[in-house]
Image (cartoon, helix red, strand yellow):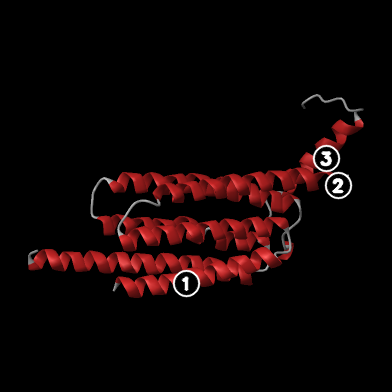
Amino acid sequence: MSPEQNAVDTVIDAVSAVFMVVGALMSLAAAIGLLRFPDLMSRMHAATKPQVLGLFLLLAAVGLQLRTWWVWPVLLVAWIFQLLTVPVSAHMVGRAGYRTKHLHRELLSTDELEAVVVKAAKAARESESDGGNRTAG
Amino acid sequence: MMELVLAVTAVALALAAAGAIIRIARGPSLLDRVLAADVLLAILGAALCIDMAVNRHLNNLMLVAAVSVIGFIGSVTVARFVADRREQPSES
């Protein structure tokens, strides 16, 4: 192995080591956020760190360590799948959390969902007072 | 250098897993527990990725994908279930 090759290897190793340490610290940051934040909404903010940026850094570290080009598409597919599923589950958890009142209202700066929820509850009450007549209005 | 990286990441991930487990045990609501379980699965995936990177193999890749699928399906299912169950009394 030539000296230049060796130096390049050392640099790649150092970059992937930094990626791995930062990716693990993302998980630690999420755990600290889970323990210290006051309500469900702010905990959700903390919980997405290891799932998106942390997984990206760790998959990049795997690709850098293996040093073959064909693993990069596979790792990219794994990361994009995570990017597609994380917003959906965060939306579902946030929606359920809002409707079951697991939030501190004084921490919100704006509440754009309240009008929609009130309107939906009113529509449900009206359709119930029609004697169970389920016509979609 | 890889041994040092492995030690640092192992300590960080162990502390993170402990925090997530504490939140699962203590969490005031079911949704807090679901969220913490999701984070715990993400930490497991991170540990699998670090194992692949340090030991230079790809054996765990399918397992990482499966863990993220399980986290997604689990949290969506539980969120849906909670919404259906608790919405009825609050509207009346």
Q: Given this view, does label 1 or label 2 mark the residue nearer the observer?
A: 1
Do circles 3 and 1 both sit on a common chain?
no
Q: Return the residue nearer the eye: A121 or A21.
A: A21
The quarter of the picture where the C terminus of chain A appears is top right
Q: Chain of mark 1?
A: B
Q: Given this view, does label 2 or label 3 mark the residue nearer the observer?
A: 2
The residue carrying mark 1 is B12
Residue at left 70%, top 49%? Answer: A96
Residue at left 61%, top 60%? Answer: B36
Label whose residue precedes the other's in the sequence (1 or 2): 1
Residue A105, image quadrant: bottom right
- Name the amino acid, label 1: Ala
| Residue A41 % position (x, y) | 64, 59
Q: Secondary structure at mark 1?
A: helix
Q: Secondary structure at mark 2?
A: helix
The residue carrying mark 2 is B89
| Residue A69 % position (x, y) | 24, 48
The quarter of the picture where the N terminus of chain A appears is bottom left
Q: Secondary structure at mark 3?
A: helix
Quick check: A39 above or below B62? Answer: below
Dot 1 crowding, Cα within 10 Å, few <14, some 14–19, many 20+: many
Residue A31 as seen in the image, left or right of residue A40: left
- The dot on residue A122 is 3
Residue A14, image quadrant: bottom left
Q: Return the residue nearer the eye: A50 or A9.
A: A9
| Residue B28 % position (x, y) | 73, 64
Q: Chain of mark 3?
A: A
